[in-house]
Amino acid sequence: SRYFNEFNVVEIQKTFYTPISQSLAQKWRSEAPESFIFTLKAPQTITHPPRSPTYRRYKGKMGDFGYFKTNEDVLESWENFVLIAKTLKAKFIVSDTFDFVLKYSHLLSIQNLRLKLIELSSNLVIKISG
Protein backbone atom coordinates (compact mmCIF):
# COMPACT_ATOMS: atom_id res chain seq x y z
CA SER A 1 0.00 0.00 0.00
CA ARG A 2 1.19 3.50 -0.80
CA TYR A 3 0.26 4.56 2.73
CA PHE A 4 2.87 2.25 4.27
CA ASN A 5 5.53 3.72 1.96
CA GLU A 6 4.78 7.29 3.04
CA PHE A 7 4.21 6.87 6.77
CA ASN A 8 5.76 4.73 9.48
CA VAL A 9 3.04 5.08 12.14
CA VAL A 10 -0.74 5.42 12.34
CA GLU A 11 -3.26 5.98 15.13
CA ILE A 12 -6.37 3.93 14.53
CA GLN A 13 -9.44 5.85 15.69
CA LYS A 14 -11.93 3.15 14.67
CA THR A 15 -11.08 1.10 17.77
CA PHE A 16 -12.51 3.91 19.92
CA TYR A 17 -15.90 3.88 18.23
CA THR A 18 -16.55 0.19 17.71
CA PRO A 19 -14.74 -3.15 18.00
CA ILE A 20 -12.82 -4.34 14.94
CA SER A 21 -12.53 -7.99 13.96
CA GLN A 22 -9.49 -10.15 14.51
CA SER A 23 -9.39 -10.87 10.78
CA LEU A 24 -9.26 -7.15 9.92
CA ALA A 25 -6.42 -6.63 12.40
CA GLN A 26 -4.55 -9.59 10.89
CA LYS A 27 -5.06 -8.16 7.40
CA TRP A 28 -3.71 -4.73 8.40
CA ARG A 29 -0.68 -6.28 10.14
CA SER A 30 0.12 -8.56 7.20
CA GLU A 31 -0.06 -5.65 4.73
CA ALA A 32 2.20 -3.39 6.80
CA PRO A 33 5.98 -3.61 6.95
CA GLU A 34 7.26 -5.25 10.14
CA SER A 35 8.67 -1.89 11.28
CA PHE A 36 5.31 -0.11 10.85
CA ILE A 37 3.86 1.10 14.16
CA PHE A 38 0.18 0.86 14.97
CA THR A 39 -1.17 3.06 17.76
CA LEU A 40 -4.73 2.38 18.89
CA LYS A 41 -7.32 4.53 20.55
CA ALA A 42 -8.77 2.72 23.56
CA PRO A 43 -12.47 1.84 23.29
CA GLN A 44 -15.07 4.32 24.45
CA THR A 45 -16.62 1.43 26.37
CA ILE A 46 -13.88 1.98 28.97
CA THR A 47 -14.09 5.74 29.27
CA HIS A 48 -17.48 6.96 28.03
CA PRO A 49 -20.96 6.10 29.30
CA PRO A 50 -23.50 4.87 26.73
CA ARG A 51 -25.28 8.25 26.84
CA SER A 52 -22.28 9.84 25.07
CA PRO A 53 -23.10 10.92 21.49
CA THR A 54 -20.06 8.96 20.30
CA TYR A 55 -22.06 5.74 20.75
CA ARG A 56 -24.00 6.54 17.58
CA ARG A 57 -21.14 4.81 15.75
CA TYR A 58 -20.90 1.87 18.18
CA LYS A 59 -21.79 -1.54 16.72
CA GLY A 60 -21.07 -3.85 19.65
CA LYS A 61 -23.29 -5.16 22.39
CA MET A 62 -24.37 -2.52 24.89
CA GLY A 63 -23.41 -2.79 28.52
CA ASP A 64 -22.64 -0.95 31.73
CA PHE A 65 -19.74 0.99 30.20
CA GLY A 66 -17.67 4.06 30.94
CA TYR A 67 -16.12 6.00 33.78
CA PHE A 68 -13.21 3.52 34.04
CA LYS A 69 -15.41 1.02 35.85
CA THR A 70 -13.90 -2.34 36.74
CA ASN A 71 -17.05 -4.31 36.06
CA GLU A 72 -17.49 -7.32 33.78
CA ASP A 73 -18.65 -5.29 30.75
CA VAL A 74 -15.64 -2.95 30.78
CA LEU A 75 -13.12 -5.72 31.44
CA GLU A 76 -14.57 -7.88 28.65
CA SER A 77 -14.30 -4.95 26.28
CA TRP A 78 -10.68 -4.44 27.32
CA GLU A 79 -9.80 -8.13 26.87
CA ASN A 80 -11.19 -8.08 23.32
CA PHE A 81 -9.30 -4.86 22.59
CA VAL A 82 -6.03 -6.35 23.89
CA LEU A 83 -6.33 -9.22 21.39
CA ILE A 84 -6.53 -6.67 18.57
CA ALA A 85 -3.63 -4.64 20.00
CA LYS A 86 -1.45 -7.75 20.23
CA THR A 87 -2.40 -8.84 16.70
CA LEU A 88 -1.35 -5.44 15.36
CA LYS A 89 1.72 -5.40 17.63
CA ALA A 90 0.55 -1.98 18.80
CA LYS A 91 3.16 0.07 20.61
CA PHE A 92 0.87 2.62 22.26
CA ILE A 93 -2.69 2.93 23.47
CA VAL A 94 -4.26 6.40 23.49
CA SER A 95 -7.18 7.06 25.80
CA ASP A 96 -9.82 9.77 25.48
CA THR A 97 -11.70 10.67 28.63
CA PHE A 98 -15.32 11.60 28.94
CA ASP A 99 -15.96 15.09 30.25
CA PHE A 100 -16.96 14.45 33.83
CA VAL A 101 -16.07 15.94 37.19
CA LEU A 102 -13.50 13.75 38.86
CA LYS A 103 -14.73 12.66 42.23
CA TYR A 104 -12.71 10.57 44.64
CA SER A 105 -14.68 7.49 43.53
CA HIS A 106 -13.71 8.15 39.89
CA LEU A 107 -10.05 8.42 40.84
CA LEU A 108 -10.29 5.09 42.66
CA SER A 109 -12.00 3.55 39.63
CA ILE A 110 -9.24 4.80 37.33
CA GLN A 111 -6.52 3.42 39.60
CA ASN A 112 -8.30 0.06 40.05
CA LEU A 113 -8.90 -0.25 36.32
CA ARG A 114 -5.29 0.68 35.54
CA LEU A 115 -4.08 -2.15 37.79
CA LYS A 116 -6.54 -4.60 36.23
CA LEU A 117 -5.58 -3.54 32.69
CA ILE A 118 -1.91 -4.06 33.41
CA GLU A 119 -2.70 -7.51 34.79
CA LEU A 120 -4.70 -8.41 31.66
CA SER A 121 -2.28 -6.88 29.17
CA SER A 122 1.19 -8.25 29.61
CA ASN A 123 3.64 -6.87 27.03
CA LEU A 124 1.63 -3.70 26.33
CA VAL A 125 2.68 -0.29 27.54
CA ILE A 126 -0.28 1.29 29.32
CA LYS A 127 -0.21 4.78 30.72
CA ILE A 128 -3.35 6.49 31.89
CA SER A 129 -2.88 10.14 32.63
CA GLY A 130 -5.38 12.82 33.40
Image (tube, rainbow, N blue to C red):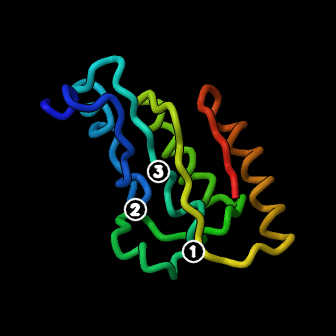
Give the crowd class for mark 2: few <14, some 14-19, many >=20 residues within 10 Å: some
Residues marked 2 and 1 touching at CB (< 8 Å): no
In percent of width and height, residue 83 lies at 48, 37
Give residue 29's quadrant in the image. Answer: top left
Q: Which residue in the rendered view is the most extreme toward the top?
A: 34
Name the residue located 65 percent from the left edge and 58 percent from the top edge. Answer: 72
Q: Amino acid at mark 1?
A: Pro
Label 2: which residue? 17
User: Which secondary structure lies at badge 3?
Assistant: strand
Name the residue located 61 percent from the left edge and 75 percent from the top edge. Answer: 99
Label 3: which residue? 41
Check the picture and name the quadrant holding the N terminus: top left
Label 1: which residue? 49
Q: Which residue in the rendered view is the most extreme toward the right?
A: 104
Q: Earlier in the sequence, mark 1 or mark 3?
A: 3
Residues marked 2 and 3 touching at CB (< 8 Å): no
Q: State whether residue 95 is above or below residue 126.
A: below
Name the residue located 49 percent from the left edge and 56 percent from the top edge. Answer: 43
Query: Which mark is nearer the camera, 1 or 3?
Result: 3
Alpha carbon distance from label 2 to label 1: 12 Å
Give the crowd class for mark 1: few <14, some 14-19, many >=20 residues within 10 Å: some
